[in-house]
Image (cartoon, rainbow, N blue to C red):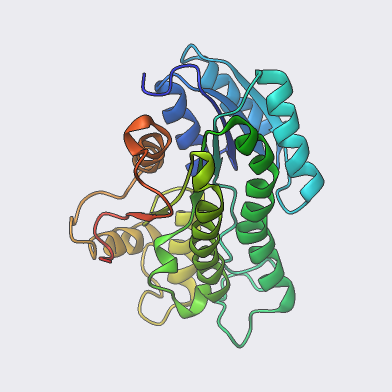
Amino acid sequence: MRLKDKVAVVTGGGGGLGEGISLCLAREGAHVVVSDAKLETAEKVAARVREKGVKAIAIQTDVRFSDQCQNMIDTALREMGGLDILVCSAGVGGYAPDREPGKLLNIENITDEDWDTVIDVNLKGVFLCNRAIIPHFKKQRSGKIINIASIGARMPLDFLAHYDTSKAGVIALTQAVAMHMARYNVNVNSVCPGLIKTEMGANMGKLLSESHPVFRGMNPDDIFNTLVTNSVRKRTPQTAEDIGNAVVFLASEEGKQIVGQGLNVCGGMYFS
């Protein structure tokens, strides 16, 4: 119980990676505020968190808007009596939009709207949530912030230029916030997951099978497994729990000397 009675907020906690992170934090004794753009999904995860014997509440938050991010923090403090950990995992994939299903995006056909949507959620949303928690952590003189980036920030792809750029920005933003908050005994780091078989990962396999010249016509699951075997470990795909375990470590006392780092948790897809 490395996080016993700590209070954590997890954005994007209503499913996929955020759900896995929320459950890992709860396993270690943390009470969890599950924040998501869809209240219904947040409530379902909060119920699963409570099954682990800790407290949990659900909050609807669109991280693109500063007032909603501030409300999330204020509500967490009011309802849970404190706040120790912020995990920013809300994100969108930036794959083919509804207007052109099955079409890969690249620099030439990413529209202003495509770009703005991905940057607003994946990067601006992290900034707004980090900014909202800073006054509390400064006053408390302790806290942990873990921002979820991506291995795509290290090895960008032309059909995910907006997504990979947003995640590279998360790493840089994390380092800036870490520098600002270190004097207040607040650790700020990011985690860079590899390929995870969440809904977002499955969508990428489907998209590549429809449009990519190398993978066109292949079974989406086979594509996903092929990409995974390009990692050094050549093992089964990562799970949300794998990333959640890294988050727990960074949020615990064991990670106190890790500051401003982008931790690659990718099964060896990339070395840095």
Q: Is residue 148 above or below residue 160?
A: above
The quadrant of the image that shows the N terminus is: top left
- Residue 145 appears in the picture as rendered: yes
- Closest to the observer, 196 or 223: 196
**Residue at 71%, 19% in the rendered image:** 79
**Residue at 58%, 85% in the rendered image:** 107
Q: Tell which residue pokes out farthest to the left in this image.
A: 233
| Horizontal side, residue 6 vs residue 126: left or right | left
Q: Is residue 95 above or below residue 185?
A: below
The quadrant of the image that shows the C terminus is: bottom left
Image spot of residue 65 (x, y percent)? 78, 51
- Residue 146 appears in the picture as rendered: no
Image spot of residue 122 (x, y percent)? 60, 58
Image spot of residue 145 (x, y percent)? 52, 43
Q: Tell which residue pokes out farthest to the front in this image.
A: 183
Query: What is the tally of numbered marks visible in this picture?
Result: 0
| Horizontal side, residue 151 vs residue 128: left or right | left
- Closest to the observer, 195 or 136: 136
Image spot of residue 76 (x, y percent)? 68, 27
**Residue at 60%, 28% in the rendered image:** 83
Residue 260, quarter of picture = bottom left
Residue 35, quarter of picture = top right
Q: Tell which residue pokes out farthest to the bottom in this image.
A: 108
Q: Tell which residue pokes out farthest to the top in this image.
A: 53
Q: Is residue 234 above or below residue 248?
A: below
Residue 103, quarter of picture = bottom right
**Residue at 51%, 45% in the rendered image:** 183
- Closest to the observer, 69 or 218: 69
